[in-house]
Image: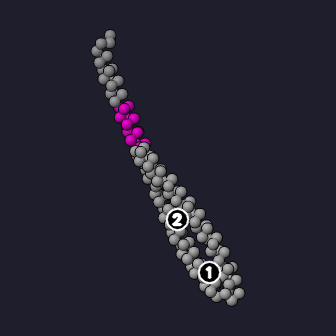
């Protein structure tokens, strides 16, 4: 189970790093989008319809990218929560198994002590 926990922790770390990269890309795309509106306005005001159309096309692409990144980030968030849940369940299972092993060892020790005590009883003076 410890190997499984380590493997899931590694996946969790990779997913957290992936989410961080998505967040950076999303922030960059949002900054780009904010910068496009004034450029579109300037192009329209200056009578440069061709530039305005290009800027609008870029804006549409950036808006689509933002939607895709937001969806990917939400998926990453879900996967992070799932991996954290798996780690918790594996730790609980490892704790139960460790507890069961300790209980079995304690029962064995008590049985050996009782068996040892029973052997000593007949030889002890009364």
User: Which residue is found at the position 33% from the left and 25% from the top?
Assistant: 112
Which residue is nearer to you in this view: 25 or 112? Answer: 25
Say which mark, if any, is on residue 84. none
Answer few, some or many: residues within 10 Å of disc 2's Cα (few below 14, many 20 plus, some between 14 and 19).
some
Residue 50 vertical placement versus 59 (above, below)? below
- SS of the residue under disc 2: helix
Pointer 2 with pointer 1, Cβ within 8 A? no
Residue 14 vertical placement versus 111 (above, below)? below
Say which mark, if any, is on residue 73. 2
Q: Position of residue 21 (x, y in %)?
A: 55, 61
> Which coloring applies here?
one colour
Q: Earlier in the sequence, mark 2 or mark 1?
A: 1
Residue 97 visible, this orientation: yes
Q: Position of residue 98 (x, y in %)?
A: 40, 39
Quarter occupied by residue 26 = bottom right
Residue 19 vertical placement versus 57 (above, below)? above
Say which mark, if any, is on residue 55. 1
Image quadrant containing the C terminus: top left
Report the side of 45 relative to 102 (left or right). right
User: Which residue is found at the position 51% from the left and 69% from the top?
Assistant: 71
Mark 2 or 1: the one toward you: 1
Residue 43 vertical placement versus 2 (above, below)? below
User: Which residue is found at the position 54% from the left and 72% from the top?
Assistant: 65
Report the side of 18 relative to 1 (left or right). right
C-alpha distance separating marks 2 and 1: 26 Å
Which residue is nearer to you in this view: 5 or 57? Answer: 57
The span shown in magenta is 94-107
């Amino acid at each position: 189970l410890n190997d499984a926990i380590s493997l899931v922790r590694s996946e969790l770390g990779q997913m957290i790093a992936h989410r961080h990269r998505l967040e950076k890309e999303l922030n960059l795309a949002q900054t780009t989008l904010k910068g496009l509106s004034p450029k579109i306005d300037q192009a329209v005001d200056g009578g440069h319809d061709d530039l305005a159309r290009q800027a609008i096309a870029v804006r549409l692409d950036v808006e689509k990218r933002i939607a895709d990144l937001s969806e990917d980030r939400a998926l990453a968030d879900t996967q992070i929560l799932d991996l954290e849940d798996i780690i918790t369940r594996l730790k609980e299972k490892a704790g139960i198994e460790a507890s069961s092993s300790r209980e079995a060892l304690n029962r064995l020790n008590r049985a050996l002590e009782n068996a040892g005590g029973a052997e000593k009883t007949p030889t002890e003076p009364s």
